[in-house]
Amino acid sequence: MDMVTEVALDLVECEGNANSAGLKKLEEMMLECAKLDREINFFVEAVDSVTARARQDPAALVALSNSVKTEFSRMVEGASDADLGRHAKVVAFKDSIKNSLPEANQPETAENLEEDIAVTQSQTNFTCPLTQVEMANPMRNKMCQHYYDQEAALSMIQSKQKNGKKFRCPVVGCDNKDVKPADLVLDPIMKRRIQQFKKQNAKK
């Protein structure tokens, strides 16, 4: 699903249009991927549920396969395709496309240009505050809007949780004292900015 988002951003960058037919096809593909992801989760949940019951009733092991199929079918039938649009990856896909063309959403004025320059300058620091090296897979904290590298952030959160502690945002001055995995989202646009920055520096 991340790859589909990357292709979509390439398409928007090349065509300069967030409403192309190709982009709509990619969005349909994202919804299909979300449906498959949901069904995989349903299957795992059905297996866990049925095997938990079978442990209490050994005779149920004989019909384990049929029980899993029945439970899985019940879950699929109860699901609505309208929910697919709320899948985290689909939401991230739409947000990425919407944010990839800021100039298309507002007229170019001196004030807007100054704001763009300020935003660009604030984003030139691509260093992870945890590792102090350039981020490979930047994740944005939805609560405080700070960025960390995916592997470093998730590893640190897991380590803190094992010790019964909370992970505090490492950015100096930030008052976010409890960063959770659910607060973090991969940011493909930031990742592309880092890649473009590296390419520009390589040419110098």
Image (spheres, rainbow, N blue to C red):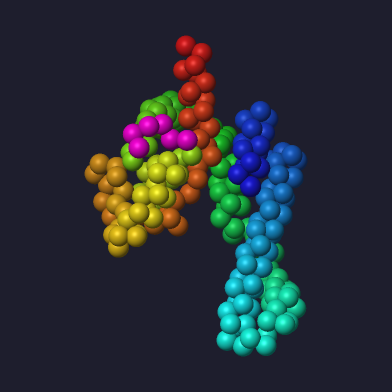
> Would residue 10 be counted in the magenta stretch?
no
| Residue drawn at (30%, 60%) of the image | 163
Q: Residue 83 or 139: which is nearer the viewer? A: 139
- Judged by its main secondary structure, the magenta piece is loop
Q: Position of residue 198 (x, y in %)?
A: 48, 23
Q: Residue 92 or 117: which is nearer the viewer? A: 92
Q: Position of residue 45 (x, y in %)?
A: 61, 70
List the single residue furthest toward the top.
204
Q: Is residue 43 above or below residue 193?
A: below
Q: Is residue 120 above or below residue 129?
A: above
Q: Which residues are magenta?
A: 131-136
Label count reads 0
| Residue drawn at (43%, 55%) of the image | 181
| Residue drawn at (36%, 50%) of the image | 156
Q: Is residue 28 above or below residue 81?
A: above
| Residue drawn at (35%, 54%) of the image | 159
Name the quadrant containing residue 86.
Answer: bottom right
> Would residue 133 be counted in the magenta stretch?
yes
